[in-house]
Amino acid sequence: MVRILEATGVKFDWERHAAGAEAFEIHGEYIPAALYESIERNRVALKGPVTTPIGGGFKSINVTLRKKFDLFANFRPIKNLPGLATHWPGVDLIIVRENTEGEYVGLEHEVVPGVVESIKVISEKGSTRIAKFAFEYARKHGRKKIHSIHKANIMSSPTAFFCAAPVKWPKDSPTSSTAST
């Protein structure tokens, strides 16, 4: 990504910082204070792959950064590349996923030896916020439909707020539908 940006001819003054296992080897911490300070000062970050140790109670570096900077919306546009033959022409899709709730809260503990519990937390505030983000993006960019995809067939109680959030939006909002996977 850095090479692509530099190929534009724009001059960047990069601040490079390690995170994850690499940062731990250098600084003795997985997310050094200098990295946090750089993001706060510049209000932008270009992040590559980060290694989080598996097991041992380590929190994901990605989830930690999302929580710290309240990066609640994972926004993924998907389009066919011009000139590339495909079985599905005309794909123009955007996936918006809530990035700080659900399994991403990181609440886990060992109930009894050999049994671990991971808690999925979904709030009305978080559900409404991600729905509002999607609806506002759709309205601003002329999108006509929004589909909510969830696991209410398996997790009915935690998904109730998420399913109810789109219903609260004005009639001039894009059409919404809900689907369970």
Image (cartoon, rainbow, N blue to C red):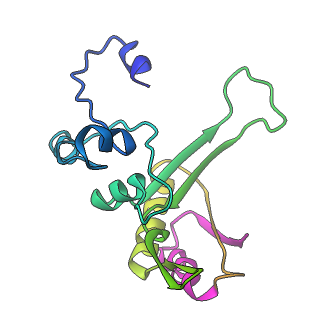
Expressed as whole percent of the image width and height from the top left, the position of residue 102 reads 50, 72
Q: Residue at x 36, y 15 (%)?
A: 6
Which residue occupies the extreme right position in the image? 87
Which residue occupies the extreme front position in the image? 113
Above or below — where is 21 with respect to 108?
Answer: above
Task: Determine whether, in the image, residue 14 is placed left or right of residue 105.
Answer: left
Task: Determine whether, in the image, residue 140 is placed left or right of residue 6.
Answer: right
Q: Magenta region: which residues?
A: 156-181
Q: Quadrant of the C terminus?
A: bottom right
Expressed as whole percent of the image width and height from the top left, the position of residue 25 reads 31, 40
The residue closer to the viewer here, 44 or 119, is 119
As for residue 58 lying within the magenta part, the answer is no
Expressed as whole percent of the image width and height from the top left, the position of residue 21 reads 38, 44
Q: Quadrant of residue 4?
A: top left
Task: Determine whether, in the image, residue 149 is placed left or right of residue 39.
Answer: right
Q: Residue at x 68, y 23 (%)?
A: 82
As for residue 176 lying within the magenta part, the answer is yes
